[in-house]
Image (spheres, rainbow, N blue to C red):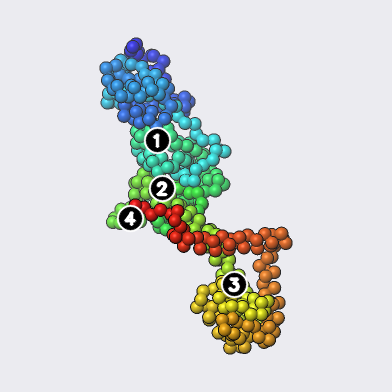
Amino acid sequence: MDVIDSIKDARIVEARTLATRSGRLAAGRCLVVGEGLIGQVVTAGARLEYVLSSAGSHTPGLTQKLQAAGVPVHAVREGLLRKVTGGAKPVDWLAVAVLPAEAPAGEAYGDFAVVCEQVADPGNLGTIVRTARALGVRDIVLTDEATDLTSRRVLDAARGAVLDCRVRRFADPARAVHALRGSGFHIVVTSPRGAHLQSMAPLRGRKVALVVGNETDGVSDAVRDAADLVVQIPMAGAVESLNVGVATGISIYELRMRMILTMLTDRIRDTLGRNLTAASHLVQQALDAHLRQIGDLDGAQVILLMVLACERSAPLRQLHRDIGVGAEDFQALLGPLRERGYLTDQDDRVMITRDGEQAVAALWAVQERVEEGLYAGFSAAERTQLTDLLHRVQRNAAQLATSVGQDAASPDVQSPS
Ligand SMILES: C[S@@+](CC[C@H](N)C(=O)[O-])C[C@H]1O[C@@H](n2cnc3c(N)ncnc32)[C@H](O)[C@@H]1O
């Protein structure tokens, strides 16, 4: 294999330009230094243009991996790569990697973004990107033109994760906040003096843009003022603040857990059973409120009287089922109706009396008024459809309730041996 031994070789010249930020920006490439890091980024699927390796450095595992990925490897005279990186330590492996393009404005975000406002230290930036990526977050937002995620120190601290994240850059923090809010994000600023405990942050199921600040100044007042929430991670002892990389890791982990819990709670709240129960209570309250204006019977007692007015008499067991209340509640309903002489008992049946019928006539108008109010805004077709749907749910529920006992008794169900 030919060995590159001139500093003027085109590949060495290109690699040297990538040691500067302007060179990286112009070429859309960066340097990945060291055998370990190159191995990691290849495994992670990063695009490498070519690799330069010091003649005499034997690392068959990496060479095979690069060959399998179709990455050309060129041997370089010993000592030459140090001239590319400019450091004091010898360098044996160096790769030229393609930087992912900054995400265009229109491209969709995930449900969590990390906004770095003037985070200055490359080690902290790399830690933030590495931690974000490891916790499943790809969107990194920068709020100025100067922050550089492509330097060797950032790449080292990020263990190459920079090559696998989606970076968006805004000219200033105000524009970043405006754009994120426009994309449906809840803006959550972190500060050691935040008003909310992060673990109790009321997220309400929205996407989260987590803003972390500069090592000395923190998040700017302008961004704090524009935030939906300013949260703190409580600290013990005489500690002024956490390192921004550490704080970001804790925040992503905790807020994402809260997002999942909020989502689960919303789902539970929205189950059919819960919606029907809630609707049933509200309907009952509405009817009771209107009935109280003309007497002291409640909604369930009125419905019971109405059922009896239609059927004249009914077995207690059937009435109980028609009204849909528990056994004890049912007896409590009957008591006052008997006392007023609206009902009489005959064996296991109850009958409506003449006084009962007169009471129903007065109550009927109230019932109809409430029914009309409940259907406000519904078309005739929607009313019929809703009634039909509710009957179907009731039938399915009745079937489900009885099928449990049947399944247990079914000979098809085999018990584990
Ligand atoms: C070193 S701190 C900045 C300290 C700065 N003097 C301040 O008061 O904000 C850097 C960043 O880490 C995050 N941070 C550090 N400690 C935090 C804490 N206890 N709660 C929430 N965020 C914290 C914030 O994003 C903060 O802007």
Label 3 residue near ligand 1, CB within 8 Å: no
Q: Is mark 3 on a helix, strand or loop?
A: helix
The residue drawn where x is 54% and y is 63% is 398
User: Which residue is labeled 3 in the image?
Assistant: 322
Kindly identify which numbered label has been placed on residue 161. Answer: 1
CB under 8 Å between discs 4 and 2: no
CA–CA distance between discs 3 and 1?
64 Å
Kindly identify which numbered label has been placed on residue 252. Answer: 2
The N terminus - image quarter: top left
CA–CA distance between discs 1 and 2?
16 Å
CB under 8 Å between discs 3 and 1: no
- Is 6 or 62 nearer to us in this picture? 62
Camera-nearest label, 4 or 3: 3
Kindly identify which numbered label has been placed on residue 235. Answer: 4
Is residue 49 visible in the rendered structure shown here? yes
Q: What residue type is labelled 1?
A: Ala
Camera-nearest label, 1 or 4: 1
N-terminal-most mark, 4 or 2: 4
N-terminal-most mark, 1 or 2: 1
Q: What residue type is labelled 3?
A: Asp
The residue drawn where x is 61% and y is 72% is 286
The residue drawn where x is 51% and y is 51% is 206
CA–CA distance between discs 1 and 4?
29 Å
- Is 188 left or right of 43, judged from the image as shown? right
- Is 324 or 204 nearer to us in this picture? 324
